[in-house]
Image: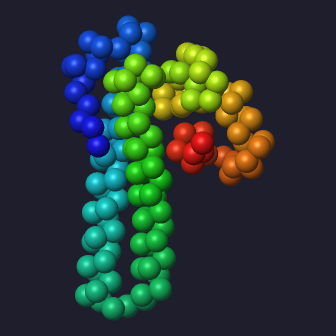
């Protein structure tokens, strides 16, 4: 994964993207913390389960819940990394499908979006992607 240098990037990107960069970086830091905490919690639970050998089913269930949480956080983390790379390449804020500018309001709500609303909706209609995930417009839709 490309290392993102904040100082370098902030020089490079247009002024109107600077606060979006800050919110991407802030969100990324939060996710790193969350992933660390969740991983640590899972490890602790593994250890306890091993020591006590009690109610294994319950522990597995909890562990799976946490692992799937880590999965969500990690997915988001990679989307943010991708957005940062697009910033670095000067491709940030451009819709992946139609090449139009993604409206500022959408980027403020979802700074890692890589489709405009129109294209996102089109993809949802055409491909029946699962609903209810704000970041589905990025990663899952490989085309
Ligand atoms: Zn578009």
Position in image of residue 2 (x %, y %):
27, 37
The residue shown at (41%, 36%) is 82
Q: Quadrant of residue 141?
A: top right
Quadrant including the C terminus? top right
Does residue 25 appear to the left or right of 3 in the view shown?
A: right
Does residue 120 appear to the left or right of 26 in the view shown?
A: right
The front one of 89 and 30 is: 89
Q: Is residue 81 above or below residue 15?
A: below
Q: Quadrant of residue 15?
A: top left
- Residue that extends furthest to the right in the rendered view of this protein: 125
Position in image of residue 30 (x %, y %):
34, 40
Q: Quadrant of residue 48?
A: bottom left
The front one of 15 and 27 is: 15
The residue shown at (40%, 44%) is 78
Position in image of residue 129 (x %, y %):
69, 49
Q: Is residue 60 above or below residue 101?
A: below
The residue shown at (47%, 63%) is 68
Q: Would you say residue 105 is visible in this rendering?
A: no
The residue shown at (36%, 31%) is 85
Does residue 69 appear to the left or right of 41 in the view shown?
A: right
């Amino acid at each position: 994964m490309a290392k993102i240098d904040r100082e370098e990037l902030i020089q490079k990107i247009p002024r109107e993207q600077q606060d979006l960069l800050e919110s991407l970086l802030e969100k990324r830091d939060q996710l790193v913390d969350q992933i660390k905490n969740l991983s640590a919690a899972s490890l602790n639970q593994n250890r306890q389960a091993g020591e006590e050998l009690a109610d294994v089913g319950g522990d597995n269930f909890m562990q799976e819940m946490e692992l799937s949480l880590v999965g969500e956080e990690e997915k988001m983390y990679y989307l943010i990394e991708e957005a940062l790379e697009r910033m670095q390449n000067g491709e940030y804020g451009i819709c992946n499908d139609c090449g139009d500018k993604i409206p500022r309001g959408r980027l403020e709500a979802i700074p890692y979006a890589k489709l405009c609303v129109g294209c996102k909706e089109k993809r949802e209609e055409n491909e029946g992607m699962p609903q209810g995930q704000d970041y589905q417009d990025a990663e899952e839709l490989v085309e």
